[in-house]
């Protein structure tokens, strides 16, 4: 019998792929392969045809110039992405795409960049960048470890839940101790580092829901990945 | 009087700092505090002015090349060779070579400057020439965005009075021509078939250099490159050179150095002497430095950012070498490890990696696991790792990819085993 297939899509790898976003794709692919899935990797850039079958979506951060390049394309894709999210497709949105998955980004000069409203969050440009090693506690995922680097300050609206509560670092806005956002099977965060290599609980959450939705079953046996736990501990112990 | 006082005080501190072992910026701080005009006065009067070299990758090696090329043309060159590329480091270096009266005995100053500090420096002393190499994703934990760094370089270009030399292959550098107020802009570049070797950050996932159709003409073009042999096109002439540098990025920096040296010297340039000087240049410390340990070569390759690491891996085929990778995350290295995920390591898969070390050894090892690269030992203790690396495969030539502070620690340790040049 052929291996079951998972279609994994990276959003805007050309323009929104800074701070190791490719690492998240690599980790999802590898963890699926180790569990016997055949992974089809799709890249979606502005103007491309969005594939009919998508089981798992990853999107990353960009320079401001990269965000300008994808802005119009993302807005016309917004309806489709919202439908998929509502239908339970797992997604990981980091940094720039986290912001644009929200209602809007208001820059420090007052310009308003429209988001796709998949997440009920608002972002405003802050006076200084929030940069450094970051640790969160999450009920779903335990301790989450990463590195933040953003000037946008994000506020959760209408009961939107955070990914976790910061115990080291600034988080969404440096004020309310929240970091990231959750909606159905969507995980959004400012943390790169890359996020998934050192946070296997988040990676396996995404993988599990992709497999369950497409194939109706998933073997939850944990994977033994060398250096993973040690790398987590090293990162958590480093200065901000 | 103030100038004399600043010189004397700075010199005194420099002597004390030396006795205490290190601290190249402190004497500069003292002189700068006593006399803020110290730098404009000492550097502003040099007959051929000040040359500033900046960019993300290759500053140190390129500066060393430019210095030696100009010396080969008979110029007396002042430079900040200790690698202290902040303004205070420059003041300290000036102090080391000024007379008690405070004059600097040189024709020209060639200075390597960190991008952010160069902005501060050019406000004090307007450079007559500048060379801007590249702007890559690096130190985002310090600067936030690539565009911020590009903005720093734009200010350097705008402050330069006579001629600006730019890398036409780097779109963020080439576009700085718009901000130049000096009369002349010169370029260095690559032959089309070499462009694929130099992906910039924007091509990281699109697999090749962008559109090359309307690039400006370049004074010096790297036309071909094989090992340490290089062919440059300079105007209508073709120059074949046998260099003491390897790594295609070092050799591309040679094109940059040639373009700048020719710009500074002008029509009187002695082409034969230029080639002789170029062929004699050895790598700057820790930058592709080749040491000998137990009769076998050991290369130190400094890696600081994804583009640099990717270029280094493309430049040095791993076959026949034993490989070690040492990754620290101290302030000078950058604390953010996400860059390791933007380097493709598959070229190391066949031969594997003997040692992975440094503060973030486990992050590096995890990265290699996800790319199916076998790793023999993982050890955060640099010294233990280095000794095992040397002892377990005594007959293999070796190569160590290392971040900046890991390189400093490894050099100290290697100094116990072999001759390592001491840089004061």
Image (tube, coloured by chain):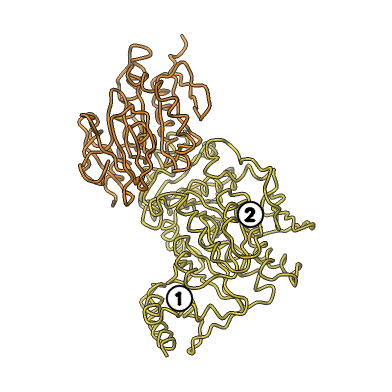
> Which structural element holds mark 2?
helix
For residue B264, say whether it is visible: yes
Tell me where residue A20 appears, x and y as whole percent.
42, 39
Q: Which residue appears at 57% of the width and 53% of the height? A: B173
What count of labels does the image hold?
A: 2
Which of these two is toward me, A190 or A24? Answer: A190
Which chain is disc 1 placed on?
A: B
Which chain is disc 2 placed on?
A: B
* Chain identifier for the yellow-coloured part of the image: B
Lateral position of residue B259 relative to residue A212, left or right? right
**On screen, B192 above or below A90?**
below
**On screen, B126 above or below B12?**
above
- Residue placed farthest to the top in the image? A1
Tell me where residue A73 appears, x and y as whole percent.
47, 29
Which of these two is toward me, A190 or A202? Answer: A190
Q: Specify the colour of chain A.
A: orange
Q: Which residue appears at 36% of the width and 55% of the height? A: B330
Which of these two is toward me, A124 or B194? Answer: A124
Circle 1 residue: B91
Tell me where residue B398 appears, x and y as whole percent.
53, 51
**On screen, B12 above or below A16?**
below
Circle 2 residue: B252
Tell me where residue B203 appears, x and y as whole percent.
55, 40
Q: Quadrant of residue A67?
A: top left
In terms of sequence position, does the residue under pointer 1 or pointer 2 come before the other? 1
């Amino acid at each position: 019998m052929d291996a079951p297939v998972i279609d994994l899509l990276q959003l805007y790898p050309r323009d929104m792929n800074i701070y190791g976003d490719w690492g998240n794709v690599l980790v999802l692919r590898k963890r699926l392969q180790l569990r016997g899935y055949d992974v089809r990797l799709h890249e979606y850039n502005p103007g491309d045809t969005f594939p009919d079958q998508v089981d798992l979506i990853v999107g990353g951060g960009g320079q401001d110039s990269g965000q300008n390049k994808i802005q119009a394309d993302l807005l016309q894709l917004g309806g489709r992405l919202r439908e998929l999210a509502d239908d339970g497709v797992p997604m990981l949105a980091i940094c720039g795409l986290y912001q644009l998955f929200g209602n809007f980004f208001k820059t420090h000069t007052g310009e308003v960049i429209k988001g796709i409203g998949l997440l009920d969050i608002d972002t405003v440009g802050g006076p200084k960048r929030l940069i450094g090693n970051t640790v969160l506690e999450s009920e779903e995922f335990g301790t989450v470890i990463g590195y933040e680097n953003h000037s946008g300050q994000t506020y959760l609206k209408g009961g939107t839940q955070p990914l976790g509560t910061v115990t080291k670092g600034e988080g969404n806005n440096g004020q309310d101790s929240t970091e990231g956002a959750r909606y159905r099977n969507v995980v959004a965060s400012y943390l790169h580092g890359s996020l998934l290599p050192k946070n296997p609980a988040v990676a396996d959450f995404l993988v599990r829901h992709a497999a369950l939705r497409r194939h109706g079953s998933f073997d939850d046996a944990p994977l033994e990945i060398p250096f993973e736990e040690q790398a987590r501990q090293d990162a958590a112990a480093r200065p901000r | 009087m103030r100038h004399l006082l600043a010189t004397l005080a700075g010199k005194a501190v420099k002597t004390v700092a030396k006795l205490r072992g290190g601290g190249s910026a402190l004497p500069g701080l003292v002189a700068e505090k006593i006399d803020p005009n110290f730098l404009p006065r000492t550097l502003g009067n040099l007959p051929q002015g000040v040359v500033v070299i900046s960019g993300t990758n290759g500053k140190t090696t390129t500066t060393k090349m430019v210095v030696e090329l100009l010396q080969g043309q008979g110029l007396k060159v002042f430079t900040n060779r200790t690698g202290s590329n902040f303004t205070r480091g420059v003041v300290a270096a000036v102090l080391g070579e000024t007379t008690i009266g405070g004059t600097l005995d040189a024709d020209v100053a060639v200075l390597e400057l960190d991008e952010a500090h160069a902005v501060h420096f050019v406000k004090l002393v307007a450079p007559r020439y500048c060379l801007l190499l590249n702007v890559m994703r690096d130190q985002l934990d310090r600067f936030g965005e690539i565009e911020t760094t590009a903005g720093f370089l734009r200010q350097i270009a705008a402050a330069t009075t006579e001629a600006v030399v730019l890398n036409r292959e780097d779109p963020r550098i080439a576009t700085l021509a718009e901000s130049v107020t000096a009369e002349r802009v010169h370029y260095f570049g690559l032959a089309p078939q070499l462009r694929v070797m130099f992906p910039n950050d924007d091509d990281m996932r699109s697999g090749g250099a962008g559109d090359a159709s309307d690039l400006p003409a370049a004074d010096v073009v790297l036309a071909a490159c094989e090992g340490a042999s290089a062919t440059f096109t300079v105007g209508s002439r073709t120059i074949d050179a046998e260099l003491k540098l390897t790594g295609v990025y070092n050799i591309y920096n040679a094109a940059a150095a040639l373009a700048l040296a020719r710009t500074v010297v002008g029509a009187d340039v002695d082409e034969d002497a230029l080639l002789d000087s170029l062929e004699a240049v050895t790598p700057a410390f820790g930058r592709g430095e080749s040491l000998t340990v137990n009769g076998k070569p050991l290369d130190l390759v400094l890696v600081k950012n994804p583009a640099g690491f990717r270029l280094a891996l493309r430049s040095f085929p791993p076959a026949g070498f034993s490989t070690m990778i040492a990754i620290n995350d101290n302030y000078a290295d950058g604390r953010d490890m996400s860059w390791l995920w933007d380097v493709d390591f598959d070229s190391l898969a066949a031969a594997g990696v003997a040692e992975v070390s440094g503060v973030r050894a486990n992050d590096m090892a995890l990265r290699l696991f996800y790319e199916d690269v076998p790793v023999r030992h993982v050890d955060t203790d640099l010294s233990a790792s280095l000794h095992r690396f040397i002892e377990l495969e005594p007959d293999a030539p070796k190569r160590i990819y290392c971040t900046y502070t890991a390189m400093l620690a490894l050099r100290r340790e290697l100094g116990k085993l072999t001759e390592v040049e001491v840089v004061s």
